[in-house]
Image (cartoon, grey):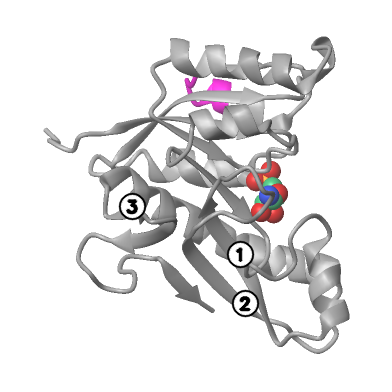
Amino acid sequence: MSTVQKKRVAILISGRGSNMVSLIEAAKAPDYPAEIVLVLSNRPEAAGLDYAAQAGIPARAVDHRAYPDRARFDAALDAELRAAGIELVVLAGFMRVLTPGFVESWAGRMINIHPSLLPLFRGTQTHGQALAAGVRLHGCTVHYVVPELDAGPIVAQGAVPVRAGDDPDSLAARILVQEHRLYPAALALVASGRARLEDGRVVFADGTDGPDGALLTL
Ligand code: GRF
């Protein structure tokens, strides 16, 4: 029997949920330091909800359109998370901006994946931004969530070369493969305590610059 102390994790999605799937798959390993105990979507039609339910994970929509403002939507999310005893919140393609109050109350306990090498190319259409800038390396970043969008302390990054002839779709597809490797590795670092926040930066427990998947290259 495993003696790993597993952190109780909720994944927040808005759509397809392919990163969510990679996390659910990784968390099946007996020695993985997190268990996925809840999936929430702000969109009832999100395909990821069906997958999670079929995997036996409680999966619910908290439809943002049913709430008069962001604060009340976030309060509903917060109530779900606390009722489920959630210790870590993982945003995976969650397309709602969260209020500063919500973010502060989960500070140091909420991470996100963003499809660029932050701090380059915040916001949306990151692959188009990268192509327009002419960078030779692009990628994805897992970071702690802070009130400023795509600006939190970086846990892990995956780099992907930009090829001649790439368009936003081809680049997105190549980076998604990297996202699916990076996010489970990064969540393991955070959930196990091997990565932690210190003075607004991420440090690793063993004093190195990031073992076990904090840096991936293709
Ligand atoms: C990913 O590219 C992620 O980096 C971004 O939104 C996309 C979500 O894809 N935040 P999926 O829903 O995980 O398939």
Asked if the residues shown at circle 2 and circle 3 are in contact, with their CB atoms under 8 angstroms apart, the answer is no
Measuring from the top left, give residue 1's x and y in whole percent.
11, 33
| Residue drawn at the location 88% of the way across and 79% of the way down | 132
Asked if the residues shown at circle 1 and circle 2 are in contact, with their CB atoms under 8 angstroms apart, the answer is yes
Secondary structure of residue under mark 3: strand
Secondary structure of residue under mark 2: strand
Examine the rendered structure and indicate whether residue 5 appears above or below residue 80.
below
How far apart in space, not on screen, are marks 2 and 3 (Cα)? 25 Å
> Mark 2 = which residue?
160
**Pointer 3: residues within 10 angstroms few (<14), some, or many (20+)?**
many
Question: What's the magenta region?
Answer: 52-58
Examine the rendered structure and indicate whether residue 201 appears above or below residue 44.
below
**Pointer 1: residues within 10 angstroms few (<14), some, or many (20+)?**
many
Q: Is residue 117 left or right of residue 72?
A: left
How far apart in space, not on screen, are marks 1 and 2 (Cα)? 8 Å
Q: Is residue 66 left or right of residue 59?
A: right
Q: Mark 1 is on which residue type?
A: Cys
Q: Mark 3 is on which residue type?
A: Arg
| Residue drawn at the location 56% of the way across and 25% of the way down | 39
> Mark 3 = which residue?
196
Measuring from the top left, give residue 104's x and y in whole percent.
53, 33
| Residue drawn at the location 85% of the way across and 85% of the way down | 165
76 is within the stretch colored magenta: no
